[in-house]
Amino acid sequence: MQLTGKHVVTAPASKVWQILMDPETLARIVPGITKLERIDDSSFLATVSIKLGPISSSFTGNLRMEDIQEEKGFTLKVQQNSKIGNANAVIKIDIVPVSESQAEVSFDGDVKLSGMLASMGQRVLGGVVNTLSKQFFTNLESELEPK
């Protein structure tokens, strides 16, 4: 399944970068993350709870950041397991300055599903992915607002 999305936020690319590199903040803005524990500089153990149509499940596994380019982006490799199936993903995340006070955050990747997850169908999963993407960008905007 292909994942793509982009959104322009009202913050400089450097501030967006700081937020995406902070595990505590990242855990607050990524929908469903209930635990994000640093293993090393670029690896994390994550627990994610997600409702997929009529089914709720908790996923545990690893997140790893690779190809890190300061204030420009990184590749996120995800390997998550649950009772209803497994998800493996490689997602490229880019941060592109639009102006001094705005940046475009985009993601593009591929997710491979197995088990019951794979049999749920593109339509159900596509809707869930769109909802989670919107929640992520809304949460990111909230985190970027001056406090």
Image: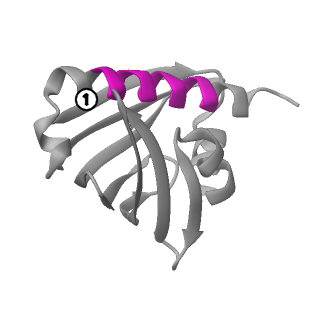
- The extreme right residue here reads 147
With respect to residue 93, does 121 lie above or below?
Answer: above
Magenta part of the protein: which range?
A: 127-140
In the picture provided, is 130 more to the left or to the right than 121? right
Instruction: Relative to 40, say whether 89 is above or below.
Output: above
The picture places residue 24, in percent across and down from the top left corner, at 68, 56
Q: Is residue 27 above or below residue 106?
A: below
Task: Specify the color scheme.
Answer: one colour
Q: Picture coordinates of residue 4 (x, y %)? A: 28, 29
Q: Position of residue 19 (x, y in %)?
A: 64, 46
- Identity of the residue drawn at 54% across and 49% down: 33
Q: Is residue 99 visible?
A: no
Most distant residue in the front direction = 54
Question: Would you say the magenta stretch is mainly helix, strand or loop?
Answer: helix
131 magenta-colored:
yes
Q: Position of residue 147 (x, y in %)?
A: 88, 31
47 shown above or below 112: below
For the point 25% across and 29% down, the residue is 125
The quarter of the image holding the N terminus is: top left
Q: Does dot 1 land on a helix, a strand or a loop?
A: helix
Q: Relative to the observer, which residue lies in front, 61 or 101?
A: 61
Amino acid tagged 1: Leu
> Which residue corresponds to mark 1?
125
Disc 1: CA contacts within 10 A as few (<14), some (14-19) or many (>=20): some
